[in-house]
């Protein structure tokens, strides 16, 4: 049976500490980009929502409660919102939320990609 050979890595605790700080900093920067992107989507959705009474556009909000999970939601709790977005048998769709998301989707993805590539020398 072979004996065990001890291996000591110098500087490992310091390296792990630096990686943890780097991860924390990057996560904070990604959260900032998510908030910026979500607010842009919210603004455009409010501007493009069908307007009769203003209730729908006034109810569109950004939910950042899951930001720790790197998630942001833009939407409304108005019960007739899906009918406006997708239409019904008798009413044509008047999309406002999905087009707003798609208008900024690439911009948000690029901004987050830039954050991730910044310190590792990728463009």
Image (cartoon, rainbow, N blue to C red):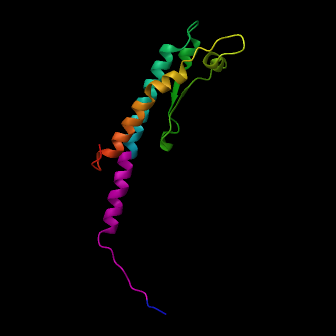
Read off the magenta span: 4-26
Examine the residues drawn in magenta and state their main secondary structure: helix
Q: What number of labels is visible?
A: 0
Which residue appears at 34% of the width and 52% of the height? 22
> Which picture quadrant has residue 5?
bottom left
State left or right for residue 90 relative to residue 53: right
Q: Position of residue 30 (x, y in %)?
A: 40, 40
84 and 30: which is toward the camera: 84
State left or right for residue 120 relative to residue 58: left
Q: Position of residue 56 (x, y in %)?
A: 58, 15
Q: Position of residue 8 (x, y in %)?
A: 34, 77
98 and 8: which is toward the camera: 98
State left or right for residue 80 relative to residue 40: right
> Which picture quadrant has residue 2?
bottom left
Question: Looking at this rendering, what residue extends furthest in the bottom direction?
Answer: 1
Q: Is residue 10 magenta?
A: yes
Which residue appears at 66% of the width and 17% of the height? 83
Q: Position of residue 10 (x, y in %)?
A: 29, 73
Relative vertical location of residue 63 with respect to residue 5 in this rendering, above or below: above
Which residue appears at 45% of the width and 24% of the height? 103
């Amino acid at each position: 049976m072979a004996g065990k050979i001890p291996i000591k890595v110098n500087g490992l605790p310091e390296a792990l500490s630096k990686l943890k700080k780097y991860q924390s900093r990057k996560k904070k920067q990604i959260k900032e980009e998510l908030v910026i992107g979500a607010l842009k989507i919210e603004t455009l959705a409010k501007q493009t929502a069908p307007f009769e009474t203003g209730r729908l556009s006034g109810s569109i909000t950004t939910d950042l409660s899951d930001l720790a999970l790197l998630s942001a939601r833009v939407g409304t709790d108005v019960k007739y919102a899906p009918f406006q977005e997708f239409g019904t048998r008798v009413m044509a769709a008047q999309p406002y939320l999905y087009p707003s998301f798609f208008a900024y989707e690439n911009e948000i993805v690029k901004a987050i990609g830039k954050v991730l590539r910044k310190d590792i020398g990728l463009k």
